[in-house]
Image: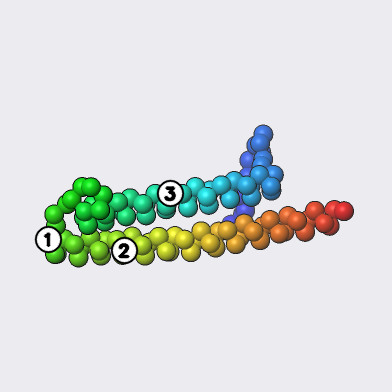
Amino acid sequence: MSMPLIPEEKFRPTREQVIIDLLKSIAMEENAIAHLMHAEADKIKAVLGQSGKRVDMSRADLIKLGNQAAKLMDVIVMKEWLLLRKLENVMELGGQWDEDDEDEE
Protein backbone atom coordinates (compact mmCIF):
# COMPACT_ATOMS: atom_id res chain seq x y z
CA MET A 1 0.00 0.00 0.00
CA SER A 2 1.45 3.37 -0.96
CA MET A 3 1.54 6.49 1.17
CA PRO A 4 -1.31 8.94 0.62
CA LEU A 5 -0.50 12.11 -1.27
CA ILE A 6 -1.15 15.35 0.54
CA PRO A 7 -2.50 17.91 -1.92
CA GLU A 8 -0.79 21.26 -2.26
CA GLU A 9 -2.49 24.02 -0.31
CA LYS A 10 -2.09 27.76 -0.39
CA PHE A 11 -1.88 27.98 3.38
CA ARG A 12 0.35 25.68 5.38
CA PRO A 13 0.67 26.69 9.03
CA THR A 14 4.12 27.01 10.52
CA ARG A 15 5.16 24.81 13.42
CA GLU A 16 4.70 27.78 15.75
CA GLN A 17 1.13 28.32 14.49
CA VAL A 18 0.36 24.61 14.93
CA ILE A 19 1.65 24.69 18.52
CA ILE A 20 -0.43 27.79 19.29
CA ASP A 21 -3.54 26.16 17.76
CA LEU A 22 -2.97 23.00 19.80
CA LEU A 23 -2.56 25.00 23.01
CA LYS A 24 -5.75 26.94 22.21
CA SER A 25 -7.62 23.68 21.66
CA ILE A 26 -6.45 22.40 25.05
CA ALA A 27 -7.59 25.64 26.69
CA MET A 28 -11.02 25.44 25.02
CA GLU A 29 -11.47 21.84 26.15
CA GLU A 30 -10.49 22.81 29.70
CA ASN A 31 -13.07 25.60 29.58
CA ALA A 32 -15.75 23.18 28.40
CA ILE A 33 -14.89 20.80 31.26
CA ALA A 34 -15.16 23.68 33.73
CA HIS A 35 -18.65 24.47 32.39
CA LEU A 36 -19.70 20.83 32.76
CA MET A 37 -18.46 20.71 36.34
CA HIS A 38 -20.18 23.99 37.16
CA ALA A 39 -23.49 22.75 35.72
CA GLU A 40 -23.21 19.53 37.73
CA ALA A 41 -22.49 21.54 40.88
CA ASP A 42 -25.54 23.73 40.21
CA LYS A 43 -27.69 20.63 39.83
CA ILE A 44 -26.47 19.25 43.16
CA LYS A 45 -26.93 22.63 44.86
CA ALA A 46 -30.54 22.75 43.62
CA VAL A 47 -31.21 19.35 45.17
CA LEU A 48 -29.62 20.41 48.44
CA GLY A 49 -31.60 23.67 48.44
CA GLN A 50 -28.49 25.88 48.38
CA SER A 51 -29.37 27.65 45.13
CA GLY A 52 -32.67 29.14 46.21
CA LYS A 53 -34.53 26.48 44.22
CA ARG A 54 -35.52 23.44 46.25
CA VAL A 55 -36.06 20.17 44.40
CA ASP A 56 -37.71 17.35 46.35
CA MET A 57 -36.23 13.92 45.60
CA SER A 58 -36.58 10.46 47.03
CA ARG A 59 -33.65 8.67 48.61
CA ALA A 60 -33.33 6.47 45.50
CA ASP A 61 -33.24 9.57 43.27
CA LEU A 62 -30.54 11.10 45.46
CA ILE A 63 -28.43 7.97 45.15
CA LYS A 64 -28.98 7.98 41.40
CA LEU A 65 -27.91 11.66 41.25
CA GLY A 66 -24.77 10.85 43.23
CA ASN A 67 -23.94 7.95 40.92
CA GLN A 68 -24.43 10.13 37.85
CA ALA A 69 -22.15 12.80 39.33
CA ALA A 70 -19.51 10.16 40.10
CA LYS A 71 -19.69 8.82 36.53
CA LEU A 72 -19.35 12.33 35.13
CA MET A 73 -16.31 12.97 37.32
CA ASP A 74 -14.77 9.67 36.15
CA VAL A 75 -15.17 10.78 32.54
CA ILE A 76 -13.74 14.21 33.37
CA VAL A 77 -10.71 12.66 35.07
CA MET A 78 -10.08 10.51 31.98
CA LYS A 79 -10.46 13.54 29.72
CA GLU A 80 -8.07 15.53 31.91
CA TRP A 81 -5.52 12.74 31.60
CA LEU A 82 -5.84 12.83 27.81
CA LEU A 83 -5.44 16.61 27.82
CA LEU A 84 -2.33 16.26 29.98
CA ARG A 85 -0.86 13.80 27.48
CA LYS A 86 -1.77 16.18 24.64
CA LEU A 87 -0.07 19.05 26.48
CA GLU A 88 3.04 16.93 27.08
CA ASN A 89 3.16 16.10 23.36
CA VAL A 90 2.76 19.77 22.42
CA MET A 91 5.54 20.71 24.83
CA GLU A 92 7.74 18.04 23.28
CA LEU A 93 6.94 19.40 19.82
CA GLY A 94 7.79 22.88 21.05
CA GLY A 95 11.07 21.57 22.45
CA GLN A 96 11.95 20.06 19.08
CA TRP A 97 11.16 23.42 17.54
CA ASP A 98 13.57 25.16 19.93
CA GLU A 99 16.28 22.60 19.12
CA ASP A 100 15.79 23.23 15.39
CA ASP A 101 16.25 26.98 15.98
CA GLU A 102 19.47 26.34 17.90
CA ASP A 103 20.78 24.10 15.10
CA GLU A 104 20.23 26.87 12.53
CA GLU A 105 22.36 29.36 14.52
Give, as a three-letter code, the residue at label 3: Ala
Q: Residue at x 14, y 57 (%)?
A: 57
Residue 74 in view, yes or no: yes
Looking at the image, is mark 3 or mark 1 nearer the viewer? 1
CB within 8 Å, label 3 to label 1 = no
The quadrant of the picture occupied by the N terminus is bottom right
Q: Circle 2 sits in a helix, a strand or a loop, which is it?
A: helix
Looking at the image, is mark 2 or mark 1 nearer the viewer? 1
Locate residue 21, reporting x and y percent.
Answer: 59, 46
Q: Circle 1 sits in a helix, a strand or a loop, which is it?
A: loop
Q: Circle 3 sits in a helix, a strand or a loop, which is it?
A: helix
Compare marks 3 and 2 and give the one earlier in the sequence: 3
Q: Residue at x 36, y 52 (%)?
A: 38
Compare marks 2 and 1 and give the one earlier in the sequence: 1
Give whichever of 58, 6 is nearer the camera.
Answer: 58
Q: Report the residue marked by disc 3.
A: 32
Horizontal side of residue 20 vs 61, given as left or right: right
- For disc 1, the neighbor class at 10 Å (few under 14, some 14 to 19, many from 20) is few
Q: Report the residue marked by disc 2.
A: 71
Horizontal side of residue 98 vs 59, given as left or right: right
Instruction: In the rendered structure, find residue 58 and report the number of the disc placed on it.
Output: 1
